[in-house]
Image (cartoon, grey):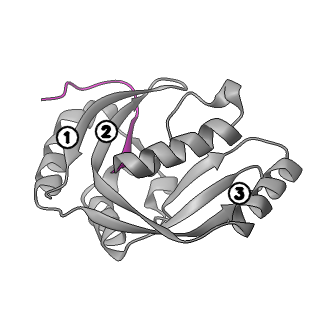
Amino acid sequence: MLAPTPAPLILTLTLDAAAQAHFNELRQLHFPPERNYLHAHVTLFHHLPGPEAPAIAAYLAQVAARSPVLPLQVTGLRFLGRGVAYELQNPDLQHLHKQLQTTWAAWLTPQDQQRLKPHVTVQNKVDPAVARALHQELAAQFVPFEATGIGLTLWAYQNGPWQQLAQFAFTE
């Protein structure tokens, strides 16, 4: 059982090893090195209350135990203004996110109350011209592909780096 923490919690979708390695490689190539202290990730919630970590973890264990793995369609690239991300689609992921939003409604920040737009950021916080050039380059060679969401990972935000607290595997 997790202990309460003063740090805000972040919830991400855990990707299969091949997709994780692919996105990590792209992030290593294109993310500013001085800001690249995280692996590639799909953020589901940005700021859950750390003092509620035990209850959140218990609920996530239940949810993951009854959730199948999620086939994700990597459908294109998104220009972020100062970065680039790969867009992901899966209606079951949207349903799962909405279920979690409903359960945690009293705790959610405005950002976490919004509709989920799942993505993996491979570049951020660069000059807009650099981001636009990368977006054009990656879009020109893009072919849709699949990845798999295999579970959920709960993190504590540590003023930059994240500390992994727990993983919750989906049912195979």
Residue farthest to the right, as pictured: 129
> Which tag, 2 or 3, sits closer to the chain's start?
3
> Which tag, 3 or 1, sits closer to the chain's start?
1
| Distance in Å between CA atoms under marks 2 and 3 | 25 Å
Asked whether the viewer can see residue 8, the reply is yes
Q: Position of residue 69 (x, y in %)?
A: 23, 61
Mark 1 element type: helix
**Residue at screen point 30% across, 72% down:** 92
As rendered, which of 41 and 142 lies closer to the eye? 142
| Distance in Å between CA atoms under marks 3 and 1 | 31 Å
- Give the magenta-colored segment's residue range: 1-15
Q: Position of residue 109 (x, y in %)?
A: 46, 50
The reply to whether the magenta stretch includes residue 12 is yes
**Residue at screen point 55% across, 26% down:** 160
- Residue, disc 2: 154
Residue count near mark 2 (Cα–Cα under 10 Å), binned few <14, some 14–19, many ≥20: many
Query: Do tag 2 and tag 1 residues touch (Cβ < 8 Å)?
Result: yes
As rendered, which of 104 and 121 lies closer to the eye? 121
Residue farthest to the bottom, as pictured: 91
- Residue, disc 3: 80
Taking 13 as reference, is 113 left or right?
right
Mark 2 element type: strand
Q: Position of residue 151 (x, y in %)?
A: 26, 51
- Residue, disc 1: 57
